[in-house]
Amino acid sequence: MRKKIVAGNWKMNLDIHQGETLVQDLLKKDIVINDAIEVILFPSFIHLSTLIDLLQESEIKIGAQNNHPMESGAFTGEVSATMLASLNVNFCLVGHSERRTYNHENHEVLSKKLDALYHAGIRPIYCLGEHLEHRENGSHFELIKQQLSVLFEKSNAQVENTVVAYEPVWAIGTGKTASSAQAQEMHAYIRSLLQDKFGNEIAQNTSLLYGGSCNPKNAKELFSQKDVDGGLIGGASLNAEDFAYIISAID
């Protein structure tokens, strides 16, 4: 049985004091987290140690926004999966559209980053999504298949420990959101690709998240779709009340 997941990607926001205050405010909310639900925060690196300590008695988990493919070496400014594991980080984002665009992360780089996370025992949330031009010219399904093919190189056991997040780039931070029907259509397509490659059991047990201007107004409808298992939340995760409301929208 796949889990429902609400993950908050803080991106490059909040100083150390603001991050601590946000989590303290979140802990004051009446958030129900049971065995079928996971709530994950993805702050920037400066917050990890502080928030892991702050959340010791909570069911909220912590993830990192990035990892370097190598375990160690002369890579100034980078953080390895091994380093993250030493902090007891549970998850890490891979393939977010912003890193694909701004850092030119391609198939080979993403594959190596995934391998590093698997080796360190950290669960990846693998992100994929199309630009508006791909949707408008009808190539969005083919692009998603190409992006997902990074996972086709991995073992069944590795894919079983991977979460997939579909984030249409045209909806990230724009206020535009894929309709619930568009989200369901793409999630069903992703699950069908996983089924073709890895079989029905793995496909049905893989959590598929929607990201892209998911907010308190549309979360309930999006999460009600058969193949939408939660959300990777951006801006709304920076507000404790909004994020708590989105978590409550998970059935």
Image (spheres, rainbow, N blue to C red):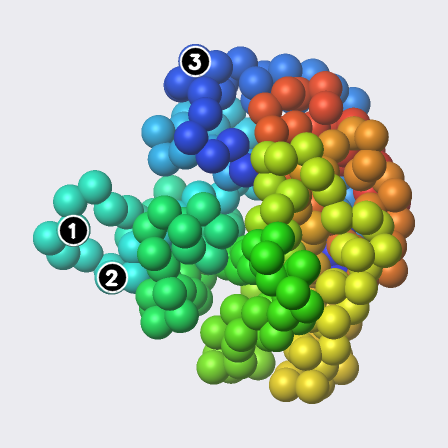
* Image location of residue 102, percent across then percent down: 36, 47
Mark 2 lies on residue: 70
The local crowd at label 2, few if under 14, some if 14 to 19, many if 20 or more residues have their Cα within 10 Å, is some
Q: Is residue 138 above or below residue 45?
A: below
* Image location of residue 41, percent across then percent down: 56, 37
Q: Which mark is residue 75?
A: 1
For marks 3 and 2, give the CA distance: 31 Å
Q: Secondary structure at mark 2?
A: loop
* Residue at the extreme front: 137
Q: Earlier in the sequence, mark 2 or mark 1?
A: 2
Q: Secondary structure at mark 3?
A: helix
Identify the image quadrant of residue 17: top left
In the rendered image, the quadrant that contains the C terminus is top right
Q: Is residue 217 above or below residue 241?
A: below
Residue at 42 percent across and 30 percent down: it is 12
Quick check: can you spot residue 49?
Answer: no
Q: Is residue 131 above or below residue 62?
A: below
Amino acid bearing label 2: Met
Tell whether label 1 touches label 3 (CB within 8 Å).
no
Q: Secondary structure at mark 1?
A: loop
Q: Nearer the viewer, mark 3 or mark 1?
A: 1
The local crowd at label 3, few if under 14, some if 14 to 19, many if 20 or more residues have their Cα within 10 Å, is few
Q: Name the residue nearer the viewer: 167 or 208.
A: 167
Q: Which mark is residue 17?
A: 3
Q: Name the residue nearer the viewer: 24 or 247.
A: 247
In the rendered image, the quadrant that contains the N terminus is bottom right
For marks 3 and 1, give the CA distance: 28 Å
Tell whether label 1 touches label 2 (CB within 8 Å).
yes
Q: Earlier in the sequence, mark 3 or mark 1?
A: 3
